[in-house]
Image (cartoon, helix red, strand yellow):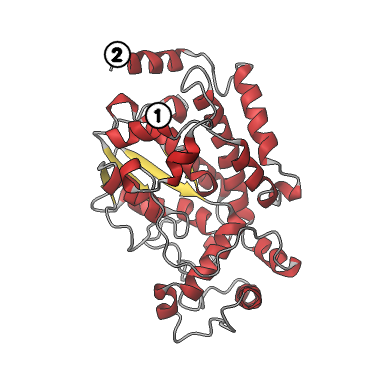
């Protein structure tokens, strides 16, 4: 059964695989503090492990019933790593004795420093022994899915540079087996899907959010009242270096970014396609029966995500295609199917 048609029991144990700079702290706070689910890890900050380690070896997480993760647009992920290293108290501390580039705090300074930071890793080639004491940007999300290491986000990979070329079949198989996948660019919509899958036994705050916020016709005012009481959470580690778009960065820098995200882009593009299929199902009469992915959100991300798939990607068109496919009773997302009918019947009985 496809994961979107599988209910998640809120009485079970949830393991969230925290990939650095993919909204992990936000999701852990939502799961553990707001929803009060049995969640591992409980701390928003701390060591970030590979999926393999967390699922097979982590003493508190390996017995979890569900495994969840959050993925992010690879280009935006690399920028987020950079500004975390440059500006956050943690980043300033760990890079203090390194050559991390800091020419200033102005808009253009960030562009210069970003290009220098990327150039440092480009110049290393296959060497992995100097990450300036912070993140190594190379395919970090894919490394989380494929690495067998305890902490896969540092460059000291076992076997030299083996993980510089991650095994994509393993990455895709691992991704497919996950119980829930959120996307940073669509964190609100991801919440709607999670809360719906928790069913009528979900915590009251989740049911309220689902009713009041997961509806394009009435969500605006509800979301503006951001607080943990209404299920709206955003964890921010610093407020420097934030940008409304990255497509206006210097072309030379964007070209360097592309060197580090080839594998992550494959994973993310597949995740985005599956996500829109899931949202089309959620919006259908088999589930909520109303719009959840709003036009203004699609309009915001359409130019920013157009770099994917060789610069030919259109997220608005992807969403429209998913809706049409769902309406046409596509085999990948049966509608209505026996599984979905069982889902609806189960919700009615609760």
| Residue 330 position within the rendered picture, expressed as x and y whole percent measured from the top left | 61, 19
The crowding category of the residue bearing disc 1, from other C-alpha atoms within 10 Å (few below 14, some 14 to 19, many at least 20), is some
Residue 258, picture quadrant: bottom right
Residue shown at 32% from the left, 58% from the top:
44
Residue 20 falls left or right of residue 274 = left
Q: In the rendered view, would you say 216 is above or below 261?
A: above
Q: Quadrant of the N terminus?
A: top left
Residue that appears at 54% across and 16% down: 335
Nearer to us of marks 1 and 2 is: 1
Q: Residue at x 29, y 13 (%)?
A: 349
Say which residue appears at 45% left-offset and 30% top-offset.
3
Which residue position holds label 1?
211
The residue pinned by badge 2 equals 349
Is residue 57 something one can see in this rendering? yes
Decide if residue 225 is on the left or right side of residue 74: left
* Mark 1 or mark 2, earlier in chain: 1
Quadrant where the C terminus is found in the figure:
top left
Q: Is residue 103 left or right of residue 255?
A: left
Which numbered tag is attached to residue 302? none
Q: In front: 167, or 27? A: 27
Instruction: Check if mark 1's residue and mark 2's residue have beta carbons within 8 Å.
Output: no
Q: Residue 25 location, x and y as percent? A: 38, 55
- Considering the numbered disc 2 on the image, is that residue within a helix, a strand or a loop? helix
Instruction: Determine crowd level at label 2: few under 14, some 14-19, many 20+ residues with C-alpha closer than 10 A.
Output: few
Residue 57 versus residue 174 in the image, above or below: below
Q: Give coordinates of residue 316: x percent, y percent.
A: 67, 37
Q: Is residue 134 above or below residue 203?
A: below
Q: Secondary structure at mark 1?
A: helix
Q: Position of residue 201 (x, y in %)?
A: 27, 27
Residue 223 falls in image quadrant? top left
Q: Inspect this view and state whether residue 138 appears.
A: no
**In this figure, what is the number of numbered marks?**
2
């Amino acid at each position: 059964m496809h994961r979107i048609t599988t209910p998640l029991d809120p009485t079970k144990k949830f393991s969230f695989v925290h990939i650095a700079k993919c909204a992990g702290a936000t999701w852990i706070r939502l799961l553990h503090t707001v929803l009060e689910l049995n969640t591992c890890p409980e701390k928003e900050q701390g060591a970030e492990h590979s999926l393999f380690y967390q699922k097979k070896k982590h003493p508190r997480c390996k017995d979890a019933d569900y495994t969840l993760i959050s993925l992010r647009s690879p280009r935006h992920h690399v920028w987020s790593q950079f500004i975390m290293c440059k500006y956050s108290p943690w980043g300033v501390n760990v890079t203090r004795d390194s050559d991390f580039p800091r020419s200033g705090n102005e808009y253009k300074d960030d562009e210069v420093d970003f290009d220098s930071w990327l150039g440092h890793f480009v110049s290393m080639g296959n060497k992995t022994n100097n990450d300036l004491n912070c993140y190594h940007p190379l395919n970090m999300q894919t490394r989380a899915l494929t690495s067998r290491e305890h902490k896969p986000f540092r460059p000291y990979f076992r076997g030299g540079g083996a993980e510089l070329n991650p095994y994509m079949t393993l990455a895709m198989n691992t991704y497919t087996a996950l119980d829930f996948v959120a996307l940073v660019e669509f964190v609100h919509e991801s919440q709607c899907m999670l809360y719906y899958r928790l069913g009528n036994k979900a915590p009251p705050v989740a049911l309220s959010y689902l009713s009041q916020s997961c509806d394009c016709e009435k969500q605006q005012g509800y979301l503006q009242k951001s607080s943990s009481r209404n299920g709206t959470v955003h964890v921010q580690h610093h407020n420097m270096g934030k940008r409304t778009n990255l497509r206006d960065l210097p072309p030379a820098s964007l070209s360097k970014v592309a060197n580090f995200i080839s594998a992550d882009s494959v994973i993310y593009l597949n995740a985005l396609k599956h996500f829109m299929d899931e949202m089309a199902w959620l919006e259908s009469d088999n589930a909520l029966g109303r719009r959840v992915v709003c036009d203004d959100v699609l309009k915001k991300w359409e130019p920013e995500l157009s770099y994917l798939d060789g610069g030919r990607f259109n997220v608005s068109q992807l969403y429209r295609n998913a809706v049409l496919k769902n309406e046409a009773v596509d085999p990948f997302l049966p509608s209505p199917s026996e599984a979905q009918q069982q889902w609806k019947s189960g919700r009615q009985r609760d």
